[in-house]
Image (spheres, coloured by chain):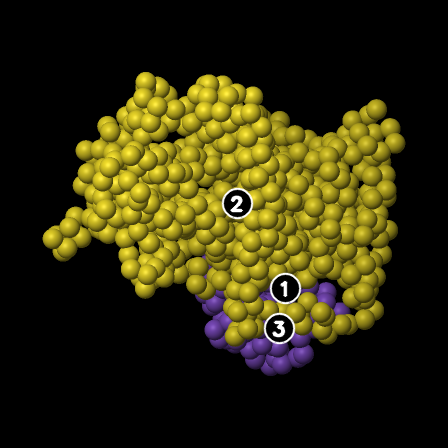
């Protein structure tokens, strides 16, 4: 939590975690993402971010794939290099 | 016998359909919800004294008004008032899954929660305090393992018990926090006094929640300007406090409630850092290996559907041929009896033409069910998405389009894997541009007739390529005009890999096969008989086949349209064959054969190919292929389009649109070609 700077999710590397700050998108997309667990403050683990390739995240225990454009709209604050936990994804 | 109605709700990939199959077995009915392309499924389960009708609602993540599925789900629950709603939850991803449960709770309905795949959750080290969870969510909770058939009885008991509890409102309502609750209260008061009619259908609290979320459907229903003003000021007020729209804040609050509840009641005993799904994904979604693996799997699907399917297909063809011969046997050889002709050429030919596709359809849907149930389809969509997105389609559209190279009928049925309606319609419209197996017989006749052997391959390749390019252009145009709208942003869950059960694949195959036979079969049969009639009547005195064709309704029609097709380089014989080929494309070949069967002394002893090359130029030959590639799809395809889009409008649009396109393109090619070659 050293860094508090806000950056797009697409800048987070594979294996890193980030905390969602806001989503810069219209209402429909915002709602769709919210229903899949992407709401403020949720912890997102980036499973795979290889360019050009699938952008896969783990949020609340389920794997979700995003288009790269979408990953640019999701603003996060980095929470360092902790190892990605899979499974339930809940913070203990 | 007491009757109960229960609805199954749940996230996509929560194993909802597996549980539905477990409960209802093969006693299922599949249809479409009126006016939409979403599938409606229900089935009956008898248990003790009860007859419970289960409805399998579409899989959704939430209950907003942004998608057809979500609207259907919530309107079904509100309007049909099932005795119990069963929410199927994937226990290994419980927090995300409970989000839908929270919205179902907002609806204040009798609810049963199923923690499905609880064995996988336990393997991952999750321990649930079911009793406490049951109190927090005010619903019976049943642990199940759907694919192993565990927990069926417990679920049925819970459904019966819950249905017996007289309607009461929940004690623990989801509270959205003081600021939001204050606004909700204001709106609720206004709604109760200003919109009494709406409050009869919906609960006032739910209405207020939806109004504050600026839900499109509910907002449209509100007439009172007073309510609208209050909602507007509430929304603005909350926006000024939170700097975000109320719906997003409320979504966050729901997750907050879930996290809190889970923290207290779920213990994690082990932490698995990797599981087998991650390992499979590392290979199949690999940036270099992903595409080849996908192409191999698609090739396998295509190969099995049309190669393996060709064996039972030829058995069926033989069977119908045998039946036709036997029935002809009742009449003297060469008899012209109309009943014989109707039975053999019209009915047996028509029914046979429909049923021979059945093996293809069964195998294809077995493959699709396997790819979908195993979880691979989501990955395939992702791999193809980068390419398909460029033409404005979803990654999954690739699959039906590929199948279109075999036959348009199963391809159109396969568009059911597309969730988005616009994508689905756009894909259906262009599927006929993929050269199907029947069109191949036309190319196989024409190409050797007009071109040198070393051009065979390139010619075939060229005509297939033209089809693909036209499909891409048409989709682009359609997406810019009638199917306008933002390309659905790509967000998709990657469900964990699972081994599909034999039962679910069998049920899936059976349903698709039956649907094909029942719905398409009847109409295709009727259309085939009409076409047979038009080709055989009225009958002239002459006994020559060509004379009969020329005298028949279709032959006359061919003559009528001759002036119109002259600029394309076609004469009435080609015109007649083209009209006849709408029954089935391969008929073009036999129609041409009949049209040229006359014993013209100059043409005697020549094969059909030789006759064609003697009568037409290679340019005309090419134009025939071009026109056959593009113009009106066959009857079976038109009927399928009608079935799948639920409207004759789209079927007619496809029919006339493609014919017009064929005319324009062939016209240009023929006229330009004539200028160059003469």
User: How far, Cα to Cα, is label 2 from label 3?
Assistant: 32 Å
In this view, A20 is above or below B646: below
Picture residue at 78% right of the left edge, 26% below the top: B3
- Looking at the picture, how far across and down is residue B455, in whole percent? 31, 61
* Marker disc for residue A63: 1
- Determine the secondary structure under disc 3: helix
- Looking at the picture, how far across and down is residue B302, in whole percent? 54, 55
- Visible in this render: residue B37? yes
User: How far, Cα to Cα, is label 1 from label 3?
Assistant: 13 Å
In this view, B626 is above or below A11: above
Identify which residue, B82 or B567, lies in the foreground.
B567
**Quick one: which residue is furthest to the right in this view?**
B48
Q: Are marks 1 and 3 in contact (CB under 8 Å)?
A: no
- Determine the secondary structure under disc 2: helix
* Location of mark 3 (residue): B282
Q: Is residue B60 left or right of residue B153?
A: left
Question: Which chain is disc 2 placed on?
Answer: B
The yellow one among the chains is B
- Give the foreground label among 2 and 1: 2
Determine the colour of chain A: purple
* Marker disc for residue B464: none
- Visible in this render: residue B72? no
* Marker disc for residue B410: 2
The residue carrying pointer 3 sits among few (fewer than 14), some (14 to 19) or many (20 or more) residues within 10 Å by Cα, namely: some
- Give the foreground label among 1 and 3: 3
- Looking at the picture, how far across and down is residue A32, in whole percent? 55, 53
Picture residue at 42% right of the left edge, 42% below the top: B586
Q: Is residue B478 left or right of residue B623?
A: right
């Amino acid at each position: 939590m050293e860094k508090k700077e806000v950056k797009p999710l697409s800048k987070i590397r594979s294996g890193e975690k980030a905390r969602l700050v806001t989503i810069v998108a219209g209402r429909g997309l915002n709602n769709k993402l919210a229903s899949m667990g992407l709401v403020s403050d949720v912890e997102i683990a980036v499973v795979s971010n290889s360019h050009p390739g699938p952008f896969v995240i783990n949020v609340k225990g389920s794997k979700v794939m995003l288009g790269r454009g979408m990953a640019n709209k999701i603003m996060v604050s980095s929470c360092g290099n902790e190892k990605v936990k899979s499974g339930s994804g809940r913070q203990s | 016998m007491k009757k109960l109605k229960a609805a199954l709700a749940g996230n996509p990939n929560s194993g909802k359909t597996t549980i539905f199959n477990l409960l209802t077995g093969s006693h299922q009915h599949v249809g479409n919800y009126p006016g939409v392309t979403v599938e409606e499924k229900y089935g009956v389960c008898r248990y003790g004294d009860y007859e419970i009708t289960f409805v399998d609602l579409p899989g959704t993540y939430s209950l907003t008004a942004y998608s057809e599925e979500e609207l259907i789900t919530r309107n079904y629950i509100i309007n049909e008032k099932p005795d119990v709603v069963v929410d199927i939850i994937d226990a290994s991803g419980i927090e995300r899954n409970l989000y839908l449960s929270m919205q179902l709770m907002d609806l204040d309905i009798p609810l049963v929660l199923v923690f499905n795949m609880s064995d996988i959750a336990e393997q991952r080290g999750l321990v649930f305090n079911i009793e406490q969870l049951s109190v927090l969510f005010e619903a019976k909770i049943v642990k199940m393992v759907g694919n192993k058939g565990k927990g069926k009885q417990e679920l049925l008991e819970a459904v019966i018990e819950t249905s017996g509890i007289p309607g009461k409102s929940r004690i623990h309502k989801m509270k959205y926090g003081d600021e939001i609750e204050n606004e909700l209260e204001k709106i609720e008061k206004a709604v109760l006094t200003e919109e009494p009619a709406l409050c009869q259908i919906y609960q006032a609290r739910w209405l207020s929640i939806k109004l504050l979320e600026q839900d499109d459907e509910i907002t449209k229903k509100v007439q009172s300007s007073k309510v609208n003003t209050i909602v507007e000021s509430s929304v603005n007020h909350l926006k000024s406090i939170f700097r975000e729209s109320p719906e997003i804040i409320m979504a966050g609050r729901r997750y907050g409630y879930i996290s809190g509840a889970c923290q207290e009641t779920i213990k994690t005993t082990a932490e698995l850092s990797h599981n087998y799904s991650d390992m499979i994904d590392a290979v199949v979604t690999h940036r270099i290996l992903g595409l080849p693996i996908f192409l191999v799997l698609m090739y396998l699907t295509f190969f099995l559907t049309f190669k393996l399917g060709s064996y039972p297909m030829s058995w069926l063809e033989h069977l119908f041929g045998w039946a036709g011969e036997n029935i002809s046997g009742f009449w003297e050889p060469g008899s012209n009896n109309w009943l014989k002709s109707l039975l053999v050429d019209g009915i047996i030919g028509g029914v046979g033409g429909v049923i021979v596709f059945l093996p293809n359809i069964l195998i294809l849907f077995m493959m699709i069910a396997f790819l979908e149930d195993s979880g691979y389809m989501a990955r395939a969509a992702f791999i193809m998405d980068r390419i398909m997105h460029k033409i404005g389609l979803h990654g999954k559209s690739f699959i039906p389009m590929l199948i279109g190279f075999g036959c348009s009928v199963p391809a159109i049925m396969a568009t059911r894997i597309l969730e988005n309606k616009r994508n689905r319609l756009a894909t259906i419209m262009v599927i006929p541009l993929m050269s199907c197996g029947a069109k191949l017989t036309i190319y196989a006749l024409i190409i050797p007739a007009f071109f040198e052997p070393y051009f065979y391959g390139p010619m075939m390749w060229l005509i297939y390529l033209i089809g693909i390019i036209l499909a891409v252009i048409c989709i682009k145009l359609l997406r810019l005009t009638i199917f306008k709208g933002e390309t659905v942003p790509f967000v998709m869950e990657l469900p964990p890999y699972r081994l599909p059960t034999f039962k679910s694949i069998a049920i899936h195959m059976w349903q698709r096969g039956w649907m094909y036979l029942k719905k398409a079969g009847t109409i295709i049969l009727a259309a085939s008989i009409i076409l047979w009639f038009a080709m055989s009547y009225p009958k002239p005195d002459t006994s020559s086949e060509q004379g009969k064709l020329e005298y028949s309704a279709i032959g006359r029609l061919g003559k009528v349209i001759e002036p119109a097709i002259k600029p394309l380089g076609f004469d009435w014989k080609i015109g007649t064959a083209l009209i006849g080929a709408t029954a089935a494309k391969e008929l073009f070949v036999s129609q041409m054969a009949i049209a040229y069967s006359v014993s013209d002394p100059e043409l005697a002893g020549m094969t059909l190919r030789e006759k064609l090359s003697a009568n037409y130029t290679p340019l005309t030959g090419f134009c025939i292929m071009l026109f056959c590639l593009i113009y009106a799809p066959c009857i079976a395809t038109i009927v399928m389009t009608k079935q799948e889009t639920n409207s004759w409008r789209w079927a007619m649009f496809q029919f006339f649109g493609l014919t017009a396109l064929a005319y324009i393109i062939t016209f240009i090619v023929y006229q330009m070609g004539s200028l160059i070659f003469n």
